[in-house]
Image (tube, rainbow, N blue to C red):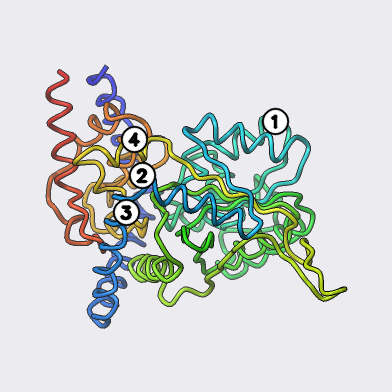
């Protein structure tokens, strides 16, 4: 089984290396992205220091994961949100189907957790109309592929490829000669009708403050605010590793994530603590003013709690999904998330595949790591990513 997995992954990488569009996109965009983040961090030692604080916050949170889950469940109820717990992907999909139903219009913000769980596909199979609203994630949906980077999911696409997808799949009047600005304007018009007609909005979460029951999301496009504000029902899928003790801790996490993703300062930060409400009529609080009437937060395990008990894999749970380790990785720089499992790719993605899809799959992927260690230096929370990969290699070798 291990040999078959490795051979399959190797074939995917060889196909990626022979894909001219992918190679053009990666060699055009990736070097500039890496350089931009590096130069910014050199100019902001305060952000680097904040990252060290976030490392300590995440270490504490992983060590107290079960306590934070219990506290978050209580706090979410206290702000009139509805908490749920999903032990695995199947339970998460069943929860999504029970909350959404059939025949609904659903808009989604980019969520690697929702991608990992197969939420969109499950809802579509049940007869719902589902749209990704992050532009990169929408392009991935139209392509029928998977995200190629945790922050920039469509980084593998050339401008010509984007124009083709928008024309062929959405019927938009675009051509390769259109500027990105012109294409964005046409997608904006298309998605506006989906936002205003949506019954359900689905998001992920960058951090969740256990004490306050507050969900924090960071973005630049503005789509998350519409996904979480316009529909009557908002559902958030949040991995339990995103739990931190307080709201201040959560703010620190999202600021560091934005900085190491090259998106600092972030254009939008949304804090959501329950459904919208008003007390302006009769001085009695009622819910569902201009925003959602219901907010449901699904805390997702799917391998995370078991990883917290693994002396090696637990360190990967500190990951804040900034994606900087992907930009500096020589393997990812050639093939993007084709080096990865069904969702996650690159050095951190191989470790996440081991957590969410099983050690056997992650261990096979680890064999394709060069062991250069650049990911360790890049990681804002000092995860020994290459050390985890080396341990997975040992596990693979022992299985032969």
Residue 337 numbered mark, or none? 2
Answer with mark 1 or mark 2, whichever residue precedes in sequence: 1
Q: Nearer the observer, disc 1 or disc 2? A: 1
Residue at horizontal 31 percent and vertical 62 percent from the top: 57
Q: Secondary structure at mark 4?
A: helix
Q: Is residue 156 left or right of residue 18?
A: right
The CA distance from mark 4 to mark 3 is 29 Å
| Mark in the foreground, 3 or 2 | 3
Q: Residues within 10 Å of mark 4 (few under 14, many from 20)?
A: few
> In the depicted view, which residue is nearer to us: 300 or 17?
300
Q: Do callouts 1 and 4 mark residues in contact (Cβ within 8 Å)?
A: no
Task: Please report whichever mark, 4 or 3, sits nearer to the chain's N-terminal start.
Answer: 4
The answer to which image quadrant residue 144 occupies is top right
Which label is found at residue 319?
3
**Relative height, residue 35 to residue 143 (above, below):** below
**Disc 3 to disc 2: CB gap under 8 Å:** no
| Side of 55 relative to 283 (left or right) | left
């Amino acid at each position: 089984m291990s040999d078959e997995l490795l051979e399959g992954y190797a074939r995917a990488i060889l196909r990626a290396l022979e894909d001219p569009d992918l190679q053009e996109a990666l060699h055009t965009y990736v070097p500039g992205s890496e350089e931009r983040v590096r130069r910014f961090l050199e100019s902001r030692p305060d952000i680097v220091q904040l990252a060290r604080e976030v490392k300590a916050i995440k270490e504490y949170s992983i060590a107290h994961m079960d306590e934070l889950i219990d506290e978050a469940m209580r706090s979410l109820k206290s702000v009139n949100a509805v908490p749920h717990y999903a032990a695995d992907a199947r339970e998460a999909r069943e929860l999504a189907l029970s909350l959404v139903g059939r025949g609904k219009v659903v808009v989604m913000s980019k969520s690697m957790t929702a991608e990992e769980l197969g939420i969109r596909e499950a809802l579509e199979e049940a007869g719902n109309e589902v749209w990704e609203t992050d532009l990169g994630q929408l392009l991935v949906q139209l392509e029928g592929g998977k995200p190629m980077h945790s922050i920039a999911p469509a980084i593998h696409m050339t401008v010509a490829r984007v124009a083709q997808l928008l024309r062929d799949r959405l019927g938009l009047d675009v051509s390769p000669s259109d500027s990105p600005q012109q294409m964005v304007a046409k997608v904006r018009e298309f998605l506006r009708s989906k936002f205003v007609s949506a019954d359900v909005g689905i998001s992920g979460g960058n951090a969740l403050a256990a004490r306050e029951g507050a969900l924090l999301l960071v973005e630049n496009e503005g789509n998350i605010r519409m996904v979480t504000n316009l529909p009557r029902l908002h559902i958030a899928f949040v991995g339990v590793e995103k739990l931190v003790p307080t709201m201040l801790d959560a703010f620190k996490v999202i600021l560091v994530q934005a900085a190491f993703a090259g998106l600092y300062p972030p254009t939008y930060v949304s804090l959501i603590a329950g459904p919208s409400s008003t007390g302006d009529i009769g001085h009695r609080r009622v819910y569902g003013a201009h925003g959602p009437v219901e907010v449901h937060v699904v805390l997702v395990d799917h391998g995370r709690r078991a990883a917290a008990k693994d002396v090696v894999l637990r360190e990967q749970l500190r990951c804040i999904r900034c994606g900087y380790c992907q930009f500096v990785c020589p393997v990812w720089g050639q093939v993007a998330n084709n080096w990865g499992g069904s969702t996650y790719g690159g050095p951190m993605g191989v470790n996440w595949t081991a957590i969410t899809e099983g050690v056997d799959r992650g261990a096979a992927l680890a064999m394709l790591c060069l062991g250069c260690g650049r990911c360790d230096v890049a990681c804002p929370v000092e995860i020994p990513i290459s050390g985890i990969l080396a341990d997975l290699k040992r596990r693979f070798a022992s299985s032969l």
